[in-house]
Image (spheres, rainbow, N blue to C red):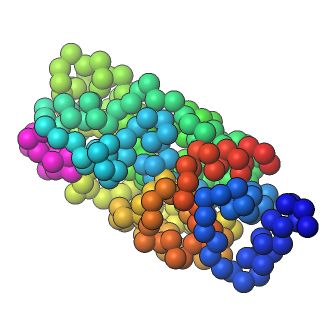
Amino acid sequence: MGKALVHKFIYDIMKKMDILFSGGDLLSVEILKKIIDESDNIVFFGGAGTSTESNIPDFRTADTGLYSSTGQKYAPEVMLSHSFFMNHTKEFYEFYKEKMIYKDALPNLAHVALGNLEKRGKLKAIITQNIDGLHQRAGSKNVLELHGSVYRNYCMDCREKYSLDIVTQSSEVVPKCIKCGGIIKPDVVLYEEGLDNYTIQRAVEYIANADVLIVGGTSLVVYPAAGLIEYYRGNKLILINKSTTAYDNRANLLIQDSIGKVLNVAIGEL
């Protein structure tokens, strides 16, 4: 039996039995490719791991994650809270500009592959926990940003909107509104702040109606975002992550490997 027939045989068995298939080898990627090829209603849900291959650190990886940062007076999760922003605005911006903005980062293989999948009419939405805008730079149009974007900023007093350049090029550490002098706040969701209801509603609708849900680059521990997976009703839940997650035993296909490499092979050859 040839390799292609073996892959089809295993895929057909998996499809009939609705079983977990785990691995990071070529076979599991071939199965993913087959699933993608047969569907025109795919949704991608991604986290910080989607952008680590663009040299943007995630939060929880030992030694390199943002939460492993040392030398600050306050913990990163404290400095990224609403109350810290309000009470220590200067210290917030010092940390935010150094650790949260990566203007020179470029889309990686995962971003590009997903952009191509959307152009082919297969990918209906990208739901991301990231704030770096790399999906849009890779050409994706329908991107739901659960935690906002560093590229959107607004005056807290008059609500005037500002670009990222206003924040990074401000002569003061704390950028001020040109119109009224109010403090400019990044349109990102800080700790102690709620997610945008409209964005959540749209995300729930896309996930609930998806034929295939690909979850990648996320440990699925940040709530309420991670809880959105619960709305998926299908039997093609794909998890791509280098480390284990609490949802591994619920996945129909589990691939513990580089998300850029996996998506580039699975989508790039369609």
Residue 170 in the image: state x and y as whole percent: 25, 19
User: Where on the picture, by quarter, is residue 27?
Assistant: bottom right
Please state, as top left, top right, bottom left or bottom right, where the N terminus lies in the image.
Answer: bottom right
60 relative position to 41: left or right: left
233 relative position to 86: left or right: right
**Magenta extent:** 72-89
User: Where on the picture, by quarter, is residue 213?
Assistant: bottom right
In the depicted structure, whether residue 90 falls above or below residue 212: above
Q: Which residue corresponds to the image point at 68% horizontal and 53% vertical from the top-left?
A: 123
Q: Which residue corresponds to the image point at 11% horizontal and 45% vertical from the top-left?
A: 74
Q: Which residue corresponds to the image point at 13% horizontal and 37% vertical from the top-left?
A: 71
Q: Compare residues 179 and 81 and report the one nearer the observer.
A: 81
Report the predominant secondary structure element of the magenta stretch: helix
Specify the farthest residue to the front: 1
Q: Which residue corresponds to the image point at 17% horizontal and 37% vertical from the top-left?
A: 92
Q: Compare residues 163 and 103 and report the one nearer the observer.
A: 103
In the depicted structure, whether residue 29 falls above or below residue 169: below
Residue 141 in the image: state x and y as whole percent: 61, 42
Residue 175 in the image: state x and y as whole percent: 22, 26
- Is residue 210 among what the camera can see? no
Residue 128 in the image: state x and y as whole percent: 48, 51
